[in-house]
Amino acid sequence: MEKLLNEFSLGLFVWLTLLFILLLLLLRKYAWKPILDAVNDREEGIKNALAAAEEAKKEMQNVTADSEKLLQEARTEREAMLKEAREIKDKMIADSKEQAKIEGDKMIKQAQATIESEKKAAVAEIKNQVAELSVEIAEKVIKEQLSNKDKQLKMVDDMLGDIKLN
Amino acid sequence: MALLLSANMFGKDKEQHSDEPHKDLKTEIKEYIQHHLQDSHDFSLFSYTQDNGEHVYVGLPLPIILWDNNGLKVFSSSKFHHGEEIAEVDGNHYKLYHSKIYKTDAQGTINYDEEEHPTNIKPLDFSVTKNVAMIFITGLLMFWLFTSLARSYAKNGGIPKGAGRFFEPIVLYIRDDIARPNIGEKHYKKYMPFLLTIFFFIWFLNIFGLTPLGINVTGNIAITFGLALLTFLITNFTGTKDYWKHLFDPLGDTMPWVAKIPLYIILVPIELLGLIIKPFSLLIRLYANMQAGHIVLMSLIGLMFLFKSWLGSPLSFALAFAISLIEILVALLQAYIFTMLSALYFGFASEEHDHHEHEDEPELAHL
């Protein structure tokens, strides 16, 4: 201990304290502060950059998901449209078929009706003609038959006999 | 290194003890080591003795600054001529004796007491000694190094350049592995300048001590005392309310005050003693480690002169080389430990939460 005390130099101690404090203050202002600030800034920068990258990645994922969704939507829409078109087409075909059928039936019916009426008219005509002819024939026959007396009497007898018979 | 030291060794020894009875080589080496470990008033690189017995010194004189009863005296250390002559300034005579300056008469008489201690007046010595010069050089080097590192950030877009690439990870290590875990995220910033400065200061001085110049700055008790005192002052001046409460009321609210009184008669003095012991351990640890390293290294080199055989010199060289490598590690390790423990003490001083988890504090503190 005595040796240590003997070795202790006050001058050296004072110089050391002065120089060290001076060095500490100078370095604090001109070295440590800028160094630590720079390092801090850099670390902050790295942290921010990483966060930004993460954010961008998420954004990217969102965008991809969105576009995927859009694509999906477009696809479904297209399918729906196609389906609708097909349905419309089918319906149109069916409708026109129906229409055509109805129209045809109507026309057939009309034709039939016309034919029927024509037929009736024709039959009526024929009947008239037949009646006229019959009357003419009957007239002729009667005229012939009533040309002599015998025949006239005979006919009256026949007719009377028919009536008796009836 | 060995060559330079050996040249130094012989020159110094002969010079120092030329007026004393001849000593054997062993004592000479021992005294040389003792001399080397101490501070010196001039920056000698090496010295040698010419054939005619004249000592030639190669080195730089340093300014001597004395505060005497009659004022400030400033003169060059070359006036002492390495302790061989008496310096005369303004009619006062000073003599360098065993690396200390004494006021003497014109003949340079030194009076001794019965224990062989000089009784002459010792003027207050504020000389720029070898150690002070070295601190100055280290300070300039650090200032240049770290300001250029700081500037390289601005110039280089936040990325260090050159030597900064080596020093930046160390700065970050001190921040992330010493300051942050020991002091805590909230307070560590205000201690960073001190921790960084003291780490590099001690490390650089330790390393300079291992160069052939071999200036044993950190192995000097005044230096380690100064550094530890700063740690002590910072610890206590930045101490929070909790820190002081812990000091004077270590048990807190765990028991009634009546029970605490008898305990505190013992506990509080221990806590107060711990306050002093913490920095004291710092100063002794650094001093002893660096001192011991230098002694071992010098002794191993000294062995070369004892074993004057083909076996001894290579062996002592190999050993000295191995120890040098270890010393390089120790230089870093001691700087790290000093910084680490300072950070730990600052951590105690700035803690703000409950104290119970730090019941093992004394064990930690006496590492």
Image (cartoon, coloured by chain):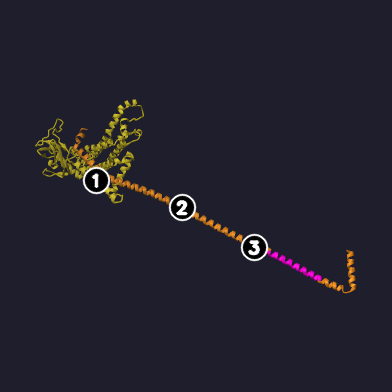
Chain colours: A orange, B yellow
Indicate the secondary structure of the residue bearing disc 3.
helix
**Residue position for label 3:** A103
Q: Position of residue A5 (x, y in %)?
A: 20, 34
Which of B360 and B238 lies nearest the eye of the viewer? B238
Read off the magenta span: A110-135
Three-letter amino acid code of the residue under disc 2? Asp
Asked if one can make out residue A154 in the rendered structure from this viewpoint, the answer is yes
Residue A4 to residue A49: above or below = above
Which of B11 and A95 lies nearest the eye of the viewer? A95
Say whether residue A72 is left or right of residue B202. right
- Nearer mark to the viewer, of 1 and 3: 3
Which of A87 and B264 lies nearest the eye of the viewer? A87
Which chain does tag 3 point to? A
**Residue position for label 1:** B143
Label 1 – label 3 distance at C-alpha: 111 Å
Q: Does the magenta segment cover residue A57?
A: no
First in sequence: mark 3 or mark 2? 2
**Residue position for label 2:** A66
Q: Quadrant of residue B189?
A: top left
- Nearer mark to the viewer, of 3 and 2: 3
